[in-house]
Amino acid sequence: MNKLALYCRIGFEKEVAAEITDRASERGVFGFARVVENSGYVIFECYQPGDADRLAREIPFNRLIFARQMLVVSDLLENLDPQDRISPILAQYKHIAEDINLKQAVELFVETADTNEAKELSTFCRKFTVPLRQALKKQGWLQGKPNAKRGQILHCFFTQPNCCYVGYSYLGNNSTHFMGIPRLKFPADAPSRSTLKLEEAILTFIPRNEESKRLNENMVGVDLGACPGGWTYQLVKRGLFVYAVDHGKMAASLHDTGR
Ligand SMILES: C[S@@+](CC[C@H](N)C(=O)[O-])C[C@H]1O[C@@H](n2cnc3c(N)ncnc32)[C@H](O)[C@@H]1O
């Protein structure tokens, strides 16, 4: 187990690779990042065994800008038998359990990358979660309470129906969201879907109890290339007065707010 997998928004793989390489080398950990453009994830392979686990504990996850999730993973399991994918996955977790107390694990996520092609696997992942969870529980693992502060989330990360990485992330230093993506509801009155990008960023980077201090009605924002106003909407919703600059038209509903 000398690899870290980092999930990201499609197109940000190089940024994730640069970020993890820097954060690792600051800690004297060396390795190389395998980048496939537009894959939605990066694998960082450490040269020393044990280093991936160390990075997963020591790199403050909430300081990573581009990674949505950070987990320690096995080698890629390939050519899984469709009749029995569970046995090789269990074998990997038995290996992991020699070092990590998987009894404390609180959740299992069977995931894919956030790309259109990978999403075709999501129905399979959902169905596969049930028997895999049962098999893991039968081993005495996955007994942690959902609101526990310590423990792990177990991840089975499928790149194809017969290929997956098996791994874990540490509670308190991971994202607790499935695929690392907060489930956000598109606000009916927002002018564009891109509003969710800024909302995800605000929820990721600003602790809930600091939001009103960091974004409020005493502040002014500038949105350059703002049309039709999805990002301006997020700022106006939090009370800011926004200079929205574009040669296109802003949504009338935003003008109506007077902000
Ligand atoms: C992707 S859209 C922005 C979407 C916006 N953030 C939202 O959430 O709705 C980019 C915008 O940048 C504007 N834009 C690009 N170059 C510009 C320029 N030189 N001056 C003003 N607006 C520009 C375009 O007109 C376009 O509306």
Image (cartoon, grey):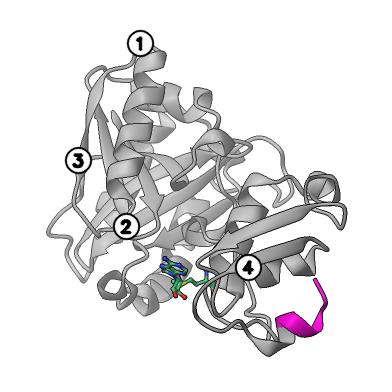
As drawn, 11 above or below 184: above
Q: Are marks 4 and 2 in contact (CB under 8 Å)?
A: no
Q: Which mark is residue 40?
A: 2
| Residue 104 as seen in the image, left or right of residue 39 | right
Helix, strand or loop status at disc 3: strand
What residue is shown at x 76% (from left), y 54% (from top)? 220
Residue bearing the label numbered 4 = 244
Find residue 73 and report its image quarter.
top left
Percent position of residue 205, x then y: 63, 45
* Magenta segment boundaries in residue numbering: 254-259
Q: Earlier in the sequence, mark 3 or mark 4?
A: 3
Report the residue that reaches farthest toward the front.
247
Report whether residue 73 is seen: no
Residue bearing the label numbered 1 = 28
Q: Earlier in the sequence, mark 4 or mark 2?
A: 2
Residue bearing the label numbered 3 = 34
Q: Is mark 3 within 8 Å of ligand 1?
A: no
Percent position of residue 32, x then y: 21, 29
What residue is shown at x 55% (from left), y 29% (from top)? 60
